[in-house]
Image (cartoon, grey):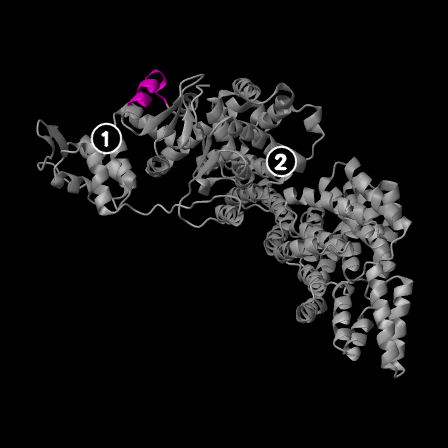
Amino acid sequence: GSGRLPLWLEGRAASYASSTPYGLYQKLVAAWLGVVLEDGEEVVRTALESAVRAVLPNEAAASRVSLLCRMMGLERADAGPALSRLNPEQLQAATFDALRTVLSRLATHGATVLVLEDLHWADPTSLRLTEELCSIAKEAPLLLVLTRRPEPDPGVSALETALAADKELELLTLELAPLAQAAEHDLARSLLGEGTADDVIAAASRGVEGNPLFLEERLSSLLETGALAKDGAGWRLDHALSEEVPEALERLVRSRVDRLDLGPHDAIVAASVLGAEFSLGALRVVTDLDGDLAGAVSALCAGGLLTELRKVPEPAYRFRHGLIQEATYKGLVSDERRRLHARAAWGLEAASGPRLEEVAGVLGNHFALAGEIERARHYLELAGDRAASAFANDEAITSYRYALAVASRAAEQDPAPWSDAWTKAVTVRARLAEVLLRTGRHEEAREALHEALGLVGGDDRPLAARLQALLGKVEIADHRYDEALDAFDAAEELMGHHPEEQDQATVDLWLEVQLDGRAYVHYWRNDPEKGAAALAAARPVVEARGTPGRKQRFYFQFGAQRMRESRYRIDEDILTNLRAAVAAAREGGDEEGAALALFTLGFALLWYGDLDEAKRNMEESLGIVERTGDLVLRARCLCYLNVTALRRHDVDTVRSLAPQAMEAAAAASYPEYVAMAKATQAWAAWVGDQPQEVVALSGEAVELWRTSAAVYSWHWVCLWPLISVRLAADQVGEAIEAARQLLVPSQQRLPDELETAVQASIDAWEQGDPRSATETLTTALELARQLRYA
């Protein structure tokens, strides 16, 4: 509004909002608008609409306003038809794009600075958004200033690694070491004045350990205690008073707070439970000062402990430094801390109205610290559910673990078997396990489920059956197929006789065990007969009582098993079933199911020979899983997009995708996909005339496949390059041995004419005719190239 450049946008992460998606950017946008979230929906929405419409053309502003309102926690009142049609993944992508569009426009207008402080407390979604926004700096005059504490943090470290790897970004890392003594003295002199005596400077700097904030707080403490006084000659030390001031910042801050008058003291203590930033209204709820509150806060600002953020529509303030807030908070005795958190929680709950889901994480934290166990568990679980539905997986895990700790505490207080507290402890563990499974953290998911099953015992058979079914899925993802079948057997035993004839919930669970359980195990074990039997048992129940979601899974599994039976000779019936699975998933709004169905359809089209449509389907699936965080499906998409590029003879794409596929496979703990990436690298080495690399990479790939728990049928990817290299080196016997591996029953069936040519070369070799074997195998190799198998 002032027209001054550069435009300065500042956001600060808060410890209490680290599990709230977009928590950092909610603060940044609120600061840009001159509001705080506690101002309420009408104030925030009006300010946001005005600001965005001032930046973007009218036709572009409307959709961005809706998305940013949702990001700020106002989506319930702003959920028009366009937003309602978006799934969680699309909403996140669109939200990222909305903020990127606004920021790009601002940076196009003029130099812009984006300051993000305290990243060590930032939620994972905000960290991912930060990586996205950093790319604007490649195209426009945008400077990003990111600050964090030096302690290791996986999320921030991953962000730094990603930014450092982008060669188009100019990244400068500044490690802020303690000030040298000379610099300490220079800073002290700049604060006290150039004429200050050296002994005063030395005393003022004593024990600050090179920390500027320590120095400022020490000076404030010396002034307040009268140890440092000023007369006509300048500053002097009053030796009648102790010069000893606490050296640790925490003690420095507490000593200052303890010396405050009653009103400012009560105000800053109450403010410390609200976090680094707060509105005057929120503070009024926590304190008893009423009419004296504004004066108390003004005194704190004058004393340098708080700074004013804005005056209208309601005053808002910030601790001058986050460490001041921390030190003040740590000085609270437990009873006072609980009382203040309780007042903050009940006040925020009453003021939030329809925004309770948005502030659930903060409410859960306040209620937990207030000792209100049940309400804390409720809001923390709500925060976890909300984050999980938006595929903010890390935030969901954090909230569920916190809820679990609270629920477990309640269970300890109420040890009666199958009290409500024990039930909550079980259900929270199950939800946590689902998110851990999604993110490939199989051991942690297994541990959570075993703990839940230990609590359930046999007292709640339906709940125990659901836990066993989920445990089976975890075991499948971890390639422990015998253990998976054991879990599915346990689930069916808990369901009792003829579960397919019971209530709908039991029918759904039974179908889940057959379709996502047994049929899936037999698919990965390359045992199509048992897989077909499981599907045949499920078909009449699916047709009679199956939900759209169960029908989608049936079509998917039926198509997948048919692929196994045919050894990946794809026909129209297989494609019809897989297309039906995609349609059913979309009809039911199941985006995770749609991602799997899209991938599988693309996978089938890859072998059918429609490479363009195969690529489109797998790319659409990858776009979903990049946002949902499904590590396994991401690895599969990258793996077979890479094979699609190979079948298109696109060597540059293979060289680019193979390392990505290998990294994704390692992250998902799927060595068989690592093998496929190595196999495609062997093919690229063959095209690049690197025979030694072909031999090494082919050997590594085949060995990984050999030791894998699952059966993989695409050894031809590296065997054809190996055959070519062996023939070129006149190693006909080794070439024939590699050719034999193409025809074993576990491998994909090649086209008839290609199988015939390979078999003819093997027959010639066995009949003692190496020349004919060489010629026939060379012909087969050329045919494999033409058919895009080499």
Position of the C terminus, as image quadrant, is bottom right
Q: Is residue 425 visible?
A: yes
Q: Measuring 81% from the left and 66% from the top, which residue is drawn there?
A: 746
Residue 765, numbered circle? none
Question: Magenta includes 756?
Answer: no
User: Label 1's element?
Assistant: loop
Task: Name the image quarter holding residue 14.
Answer: top left
Q: Please identify the dominant SS of the magenta region.
A: helix
Task: Tell me residue 767's x, y (percent).
Answer: 90, 82
Q: Which residue is mark 2?
A: 92
- Alpha-carbon span between mark 2 and mark 1: 48 Å
Task: Tell me residue 773's x, y (percent).
Answer: 86, 77
Q: Is residue 690 above or below residue 244?
A: below
In this picture, residue 110 sits left or right of residue 648: left
Q: Nearer the viewer, residue 790 or 50?
A: 790
Q: Which dot, 2 or 1, sits closer to the camera?
A: 2
How dense is the environment of label 1, judged by Cα within 10 Å: few (below 14), some, or many (20 and up)? Answer: few
Q: Measuring 61% from the left and 52% from the top, which residue is drawn there?
A: 445
Q: Nearer the viewer, residue 403 or 562?
A: 562
Please provide the residue range marked out in magenta: 288-299
Q: Nearer the viewer, residue 475 or 350?
A: 475
Residue 259, numbered circle? 1
Q: Is residue 480 visible?
A: no
Task: Tell me residue 385's x, y (percent).
Answer: 61, 38
The residue type indicated by label 1 comes to Arg
Q: Is residue 525 above or below residue 208?
A: below
